[in-house]
Amino acid sequence: MTIRPILIHPDPRLKKVTAPVASIDDDLRRLADDMLETMYEAPGIGLAAPQVAVMRRVIVMDCQKDAEATPEPMVLINPEIIWSSEATSVYDEGCLSIPEQYAEVTRPAEVEVAWLGLDGKPQRARFDGLWATCVQHEIDHLDGKLFIDCLGPLKRQMITRKMQKLKREMARG
């Protein structure tokens, strides 16, 4: 397994819609393993393939935050939200591609998602709480949308300017 570099906003690849996965092979399984390792190392609770410069519809997540609990890693291939609750929840979201920036985002409180597992079999589950927020956030990445796109223009511009400055500082070493 390899820890992959995470793209930092603004990067044009983070704004692109990703391509569906046509077949599940060893390369895809390796990508999923790398993404999980990268996510845990960051540390984060979710990661989408475009964040590691792979323009395919793959996300990983593990919202089990209790250090004493067994990890619950999930790999979702071609995930699709098939139902959303009318009830909403607000969560102070962050993103590995927008480090150290957080903002409250309102999303459906519950969602039902269909996807393919690494075995190629269709799966479906209903998510609530942090899991619902995370899966929606990661699926947004597959559609070229960042959590800051849910914010007002001033807050979005402020965060983007901070990220541009961070990238300049990182480039200088």
Image (tube, rainbow, N blue to C red):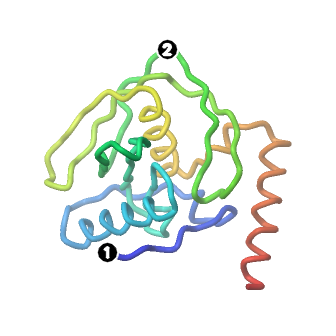
Element on which disc 1 rests? loop
Please state, as top left, top right, bottom left or bottom right, where the C terminus lies in the image.
bottom right
Using the image, determine if residue 128 lies above or below residue 123: above
Q: Is residue 76 visible?
A: no
**Residue 59, position in %: x, y?**
38, 53
Q: Give the mark nearer the N terminus: 2 vs 1.
A: 1
The x and y percentages for residue 11 are: 65, 66
Instruction: Classify residue 33 as left or right of residue 53.
Output: left
Identity of the amino acid at label 1?
Met
Q: Is residue 130 left or right of residue 58?
A: right
Front of the two marks 2 and 1: 1
Q: How many marks?
A: 2
Residue 70 visible (yes or no): yes
Residue 23 sits above or below residue 65 on the image: below
Question: At label 2, which amino acid type do we have?
Answer: Glu
Question: For residue 1, which numbered disc appears in the image?
Answer: 1
In space, the residues marked 2 and 1 are separated at their CA atoms by 40 Å
Q: Residue furthest top?
A: 87
Please determine whether, in this image, residue 103 is positioned above or below residue 164.
above
Mark 2 Cα-neighbour bin, 10 Å: few <14, some 14–19, many ≥20: few
List x then y, in percent, for residue 164: 78, 66
Residue at image point 64% right, 36% down: 92
Q: Residue 102 is drawn in which quadrant?
A: top right
Q: Which residue is mark 2?
A: 86
- Residue found farthest to the bottom: 173
- The x, y position of residue 70, in whole percent, is 29, 46
Q: Secondary structure at mark 2?
A: loop
Q: Residue at x 85, y 42 (%)?
A: 154
Residue located 71% across and 50% down the image: 101
